[in-house]
């Protein structure tokens, strides 16, 4: 009791005490509301508004039968009715007259899996083809050297005079044996696989449709015929899937993701695309050579053959050449190309299986072409003639149009970006960033 209250009557003291308690209650309520508001703001920072419509499939959190103290997600259930902003009536298949009301915090969307787990739908790839994940198809018959076809595909009549065309013909005829649609086989290097752990990885083949099975059998037969693979068994198996890209023929691809996780990384600096493009763009004459199924021209060591074995629904096969999808395949290929073109870096730049040869005069360009093709001939590699461009003033290279000091983006790429629909989901945003990047 305060000294000032000693002269007050009991009634006055009781009323003063009641007023003080009332004031304390008001202060406590105000402080509580203030703290509740702060806590709500902090909670809502990570909160996501959850709303469902009738017919949506959901998972429901409920107690587990063996252990009533444990909870788990069960379902899927179906939203039958929305009672309020937070309450929904959910029904479960097979349980008649068993509709139950659930709070929205006990529900989450159910996403149905695709029926074909091995089906991959991707965006159209860039002009840098057959570099990484796509499993290349083998042409049924290798084409021989055909200068008329090369002249037409490179539009040489519009770029060179008759004497220059004849000089180019004589030079390419000298190396006609290295032009083929059939992959060669180099003796310079063999790709090996070193593992972090030695526990074998054994994967079952993916389930595929009869139509996809026939496509895979056709491609497997071609690879067996050209001795890219052989029948066999191994304690390591990775599954083969079928990649179906819009506007292109289906191609088989080996899923090496599990194997790559236990593979030791090999370090070799991959070439910088921007630097390559800038270097080539300043030249007056540019030729671009494309190796035939580049990866398949590198043999595997016996150890790598065992580890890289793949399995299908109709058999197990051992790759004899370096397949696409292996973790260190780009490094092995880039190192081989760097060794082959050693000493030619002032007029030839490789990017995986694409080699750009650039010069500022016609005489230099013939000399440079002769030097590069001589090196390729000595290695046992082959070049795909239909994909090569010779003596161009402007050429499509690594997704750009380059030549005569000019560098512009590929019009097809620009159109694809301009025509891309406005992204509305995270997946669409990632797809756009991949396209624009």
Image (cartoon, rainbow, N blue to C red):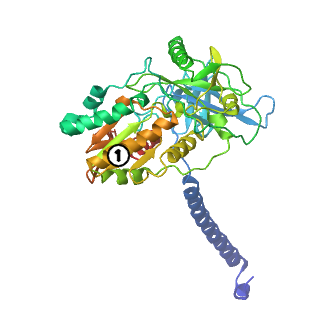
Percent from the top left, x then y, of residue 278?
A: 35, 54
Q: Determine the residue positioned at 36% across, 46% down.
A: 368
Q: Determine the residue positioned at 54% across, 51% down.
A: 269
Q: Determine the residue positioned at 28% across, 47% down.
A: 363
Where is residue 336, by image quadrant?
top right
What kind of element bears circle 1?
helix
Left or right, residue 280 beside residue 157: right
Is residue 196 placed above or below 14 in the rendered structure?
A: above
Q: Residue furthest right?
A: 66
Percent from the top left, x then y, of residue 5?
A: 71, 84
Q: Is residue 132 visible?
A: no
Where is residue 249, by image quadrant?
top left
Q: Nearer the viewer, residue 203 or 294?
A: 294
The total of numbered circles placed on residues is 1
Percent from the top left, x then y, of residue 403?
A: 28, 49
Q: Nearer the viewer, residue 237 or 421?
A: 237
Q: Nearer the viewer, residue 165 or 131?
A: 165
Left or right, residue 357 beside residue 209: left
| CA neighbours of label 1 inside 10 A, class few (<14), some (14 to 19), many (20+) | few
Percent from the top left, x then y, of residue 29?
A: 61, 64
Q: Is residue 176 visible?
A: yes
Q: Nearer the viewer, residue 166 or 351?
A: 166
Is residue 225 placed above or below 164 in the rendered structure?
A: above
Q: Which residue is mark 1?
A: 367
Is residue 227 placed above or below 257 in the rendered structure?
A: above
Quadrant housing the N terminus: bottom right
Q: Determine the residue positioned at 27% across, 42% down.
A: 392
């Amino acid at each position: 009791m305060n000294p000032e209250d000693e002269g007050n009557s009991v009634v006055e003291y009781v009323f003063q005490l009641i007023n003080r308690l009332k004031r304390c209650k008001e202060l406590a309520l105000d402080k509580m509301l203030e703290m509740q508001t702060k806590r709500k703001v902090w909670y809502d920072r990570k909160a996501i508004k959850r709303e469902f419509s009738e017919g949506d499939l959901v998972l429901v959190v409920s107690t587990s039968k063996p252990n009533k103290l444990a909870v788990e997600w069960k379902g899927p259930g179906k939203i039958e009715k929305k009672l309020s902003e937070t309450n929904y009536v959910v029904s479960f298949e097979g349980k008649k007259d068993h509709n139950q009301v659930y709070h929205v915090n006990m529900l989450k969307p159910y996403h149905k899996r695709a029926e074909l787990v091995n089906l991959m739908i991707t965006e159209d790839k860039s002009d840098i083809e057959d570099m990484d994940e796509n499993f290349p198809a083998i042409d049924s018959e290798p084409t021989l050297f055909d200068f008329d076809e090369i002249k037409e595909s490179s539009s040489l009549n519009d770029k060179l005079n008759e004497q220059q065309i004849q000089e180019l013909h004589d030079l390419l005829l000298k190396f006609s044996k290295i032009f083929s649609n059939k992959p060669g086989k180099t003796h310079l290097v063999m790709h090996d696989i070193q593992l972090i752990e030695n526990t074998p990885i054994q994967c079952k083949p993916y389930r595929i449709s009869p139509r996809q099975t026939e496509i895979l059998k056709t491609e497997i037969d071609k690879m067996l015929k050209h001795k890219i693979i052989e029948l066999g068994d191994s304690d390591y198996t990775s599954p083969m899937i079928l990649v179906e890209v819009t506007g292109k023929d289906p191609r088989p691809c080996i899923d090496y993701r599990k194997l790559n996780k236990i593979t030791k990384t090999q370090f070799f600096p991959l070439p910088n695309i921007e630097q390559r493009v800038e270097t080539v763009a300043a030249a007056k004459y540019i030729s671009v050579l494309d190796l035939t199924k580049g990866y398949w021209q590198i043999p595997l060591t016996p150890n790598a053959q065992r580890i890289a074995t793949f399995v299908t629904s109709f058999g197990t096969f051992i790759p004899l050449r370096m397949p696409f999808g292996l973790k260190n395949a780009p490094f092995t290929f880039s190192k081989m190309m760097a060794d082959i073109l050693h000493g030619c870096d002032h007029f030839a730049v490789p990017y995986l299986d694409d080699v750009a040869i650039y010069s500022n005069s016609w005489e230099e360009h013939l000399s440079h072409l002769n030097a590069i093709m001589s090196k390729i001939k000595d290695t046992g590699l082959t070049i795909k003639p239909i994909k090569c461009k010779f003596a161009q003033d402007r050429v499509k290279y690594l997704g750009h149009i380059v030549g005569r000091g000019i560098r512009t983006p590929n019009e097809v790429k620009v159109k694809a970006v301009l025509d891309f629909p406005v992204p509305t989901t995270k997946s669409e945003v990632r797809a756009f960033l991949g396209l624009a990047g």
